[in-house]
Image (spheres, helix red, strand yellow):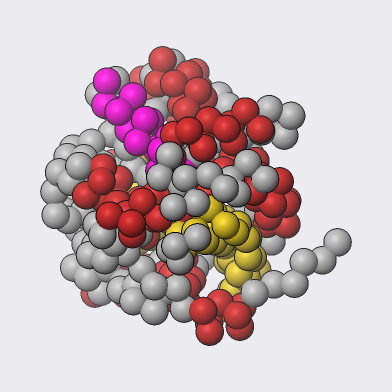
């Protein structure tokens, strides 16, 4: 079996609202860069990475095209060999960012091909450890009023979710009001994750605000200070006792290692679509386990479910679904994707990734490259 063709497609799905953020660019769409790898025996594997308008989709596609010259004619089941070739090829592109996003899509596609060629799902190839995984709904955008936030959470609770992530703003009093409102709704036996998106900026403010919401028992405080401030994240935990999460913006296993060595995070949120695919996510989970730090992958539950099922619940306790944006995207991408039920992620059973691309829907949402 040899690789014959590599192609990248930008699937752009408009949002019905503007997703407003305080410290990162706001979004009007949620898309994905889809990489297809076709072999001479007819097997086609695919992978994907982020592709909204603020995630550099055309740059990612250009990197996929650049990497394709190192793939044509190769055996796709030699995943580590090809991964190392692409890492070397990315030397002058930068071994993180869009180059690694492109590498990630290719790596996932290769795992999809391997699973399809052997007739088993990827989680079987990784060594299945369990049958199910809990998932949390990730919404609660910072611009929502308390009433809107409570109503959003009420809907998700009624759909069967038992964990929910909300975003908190800079203003301390508003943080307290929102946390009180949602905790009063769901009671004590519901996990509430809090994402700050680096909004609190400095460590003193982060400690002050975290202590203010501590009584509402957040499952974690996510990225309360700047992404690169590992010491600051560690200090927030030391001075508040509230677990700290982060890592979705660490685009290499080497950065994750540095974070672990500095005790920056109680939960690592690395992402296979950014960090080097399934191959390097597996390495990161093992590395984090040696530090006794759980991993809760960021987004992409359709991909991350395979890694989650290969590890015990204490090591990967949750997966994330961006309910109002990524949920609709997955329903467009695949003909057979099922949304979570009763707080459990959908587990595919077909070979490879286990999904069938909805080619008609994809054609409808393909974006034309513009300069």
Q: In the displayed structure, would residue 368 be above or below residue 190?
A: below
Q: Would you say 79 lies left or right of 14 here?
A: left
Going 57% across and 57% down the picture, which residue do you hit? 4
Q: Position of residue 49 (x, y in %)?
A: 54, 54
Between 65 and 326, which is closer to the camera in this rendering?
Answer: 65
Answer left or right for 118 relative to 264. left
Answer above or below: position of 33 versus 89. Answer: below
Query: Is 208 in front, or is 72?
Result: 72
When the figure is inspected, residue 356 is found, relative to residue 128, above or below; the finding is: below
| Observer able to see residue 132 | yes
Nearer to the camera, 238 or 322: 322
Q: Exactly how many numbered labels are in the figure? A: 0
Q: Is residue 282 magenta?
A: yes
Whole-percent x, y for residue 194 in the image: 40, 47
- The residue under the point 30% across, 28% down is 286
Q: In the image shown, does 239 or 36 lie closer to the viewer?
A: 36
Q: Position of residue 346 (x, y in %)?
A: 26, 65
Q: Which residues are magenta?
A: 277-290
Q: Quadrant of residue 365?
A: bottom right
- Picture residue at 63% right of the left edge, 41% below the top: 70
Residue sitting at x 69%, y 52%: 65
């Amino acid at each position: 079996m040899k690789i014959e063709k590599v192609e990248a497609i930008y699937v752009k799905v408009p949002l019905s609202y503007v997703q407003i953020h305080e410290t990162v660019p706001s979004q009007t769409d949620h898309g994905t860069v889809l990489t297809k790898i076709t072999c001479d025996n007819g097997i086609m594997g695919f992978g994907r990475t982020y592709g909204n308008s603020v995630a550099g989709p055309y740059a990612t596609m250009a990197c996929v095209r650049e990497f394709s010259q190192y793939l044509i004619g190769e055996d796709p089941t030699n995943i580590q060999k090809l991964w190392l070739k692409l890492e070397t090829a990315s030397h002058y592109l930068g071994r993180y960012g869009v180059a690694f996003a492109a590498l990630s899509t290719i790596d996932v596609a290769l795992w999809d091909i391997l699973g399809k060629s052997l007739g088993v799902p990827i989680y079987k190839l990784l060594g299945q450890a369990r049958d199910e995984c809990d998932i949390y709904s990730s919404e609660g955008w910072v611009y929502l009023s308390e009433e809107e936030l409570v109503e959003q959470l009420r809907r998700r609770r009624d759909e069967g979710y038992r964990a929910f992530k909300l975003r908190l703003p800079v203003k301390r009093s508003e943080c307290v009001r929102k946390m009180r409102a949602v905790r009063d709704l769901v009671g004590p036996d519901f996990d509430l994750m809090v994402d700050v998106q680096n909004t609190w900026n400095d460590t003193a403010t982060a400690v002050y605000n975290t202590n203010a919401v501590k009584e509402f028992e957040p499952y974690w405080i996510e990225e309360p200070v700047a992404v690169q401030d590992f010491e600051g994240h560690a200090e927030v935990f030391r001075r508040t006792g509230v677990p700290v999460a982060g890592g979705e913006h660490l685009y290499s296993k080497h950065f994750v290692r540095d974070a672990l060595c500095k005790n920056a995070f109680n939960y690592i949120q690395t992402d296979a679509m950014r960090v080097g695919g399934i191959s390097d996510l597996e390495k990161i989970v093992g590395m984090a386990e040696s530090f006794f730090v759980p991993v809760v992958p960021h987004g992409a539950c359709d991909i991350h479910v395979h890694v989650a099922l290969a590890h015990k619940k204490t090591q990967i306790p949750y997966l994330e679904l961006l309910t109002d944006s990524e949920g609709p995207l997955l329903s467009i991408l695949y003909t057979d994707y099922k949304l979570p039920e009763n707080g459990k992620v959908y587990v595919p059973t077909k070979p490879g990734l286990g999904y069938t691309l909805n080619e008609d829907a994809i054609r409808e949402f393909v974006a034309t490259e513009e300069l």
